[in-house]
Image (tube, rainbow, N blue to C red):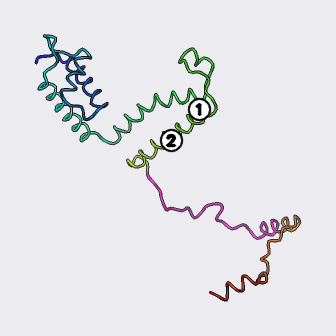
Amino acid sequence: MATTPHKEENLKLAIRDEISKNPYLSVLALQSILHKRGFQAASGNPLEWHYLAKLIRKLNREKALAVDTQKIQERLAITKESYRLIIRSLWRIIDWQPEYLEQYFIHPPRNEERIKAANTLIKLDLAILKAEMDAGIFERKLGEVDITLHRAIPLPPETTAKIAEAFERWGIDLRPKAALPETKVQSQINSTT
């Protein structure tokens, strides 16, 4: 069957749409669906099933080749680009403005809708960050501790003495307490162990 490249591309897109809806679609069922959608032979009959099967095999080879040759950075770029529209819509829900009603037909969201949109936005952002980290775009520094942390350096003795004096004035005793006498229950537990 001779078709123009433009018509064949439209047919391929239609086939991909139908197969993505139902991956187990038979060629004959696909033939019927495509005929209803207006894809037909020059005589007005449905497309030949041999031709459709050939196009399905061609599409499967193209998909397999695209997956083999695709780099992770390219795939992440595609994912981020597709999320861009979602993120824009989520921000319109979170930061709703009265003009959005006329421009985008978005009614004022309820508080729980705003919270859900914010949670979804955070989850998308974290998912992209995790994927980028897994792809090695960022270096992970796990298990490293900076010894020169400010909190890890002991205070000078005069500062420590001033802090202890302030606690004493407030009635807080920082000295270790003497051990409390054992109760009968504690002594029984200690004697059985």
> Sequence order check: which comes first, mark 1 or mark 2?
1
Within the image, what quadrant is residue 15 found in? top left
Q: Tag 2: residue type?
A: Lys
Labelled disc at residue 113: 1
Instruction: Give the side of residue 9 with respect to residue 153, left or right.
Output: left
Magenta-drawn segment:
139-164
Coordinates of residue 90 in the picture (x, y in percent): 53, 30
C-beta proximity under 8 Å, tags 1 and 2: no
Residue at left offset 23%, top offset 20%: 34
Q: In what quadrant of the picture does the C terminus appear?
A: bottom right
Coordinates of residue 100 in the picture (x, y in percent): 58, 19
Helix, strand or loop under label 2: helix
Q: Is residue 155 above or below residue 43?
A: below
**Nearest the camera: 138 or 116?**
116
**Circle 1: is it few (<14), some (14-19), or many (20+) Cα within 10 Å?**
some
- Closer to the observer: label 1 or label 2? 1
**Nearest the camera: 109 or 154?**
109
Labelled disc at residue 187: none
**Nearest the camera: 49 or 130?**
49
Magenta span includes 11:
no
Residue at left offset 45%, top offset 54%: 140
Mark 2 = which residue? Answer: 123
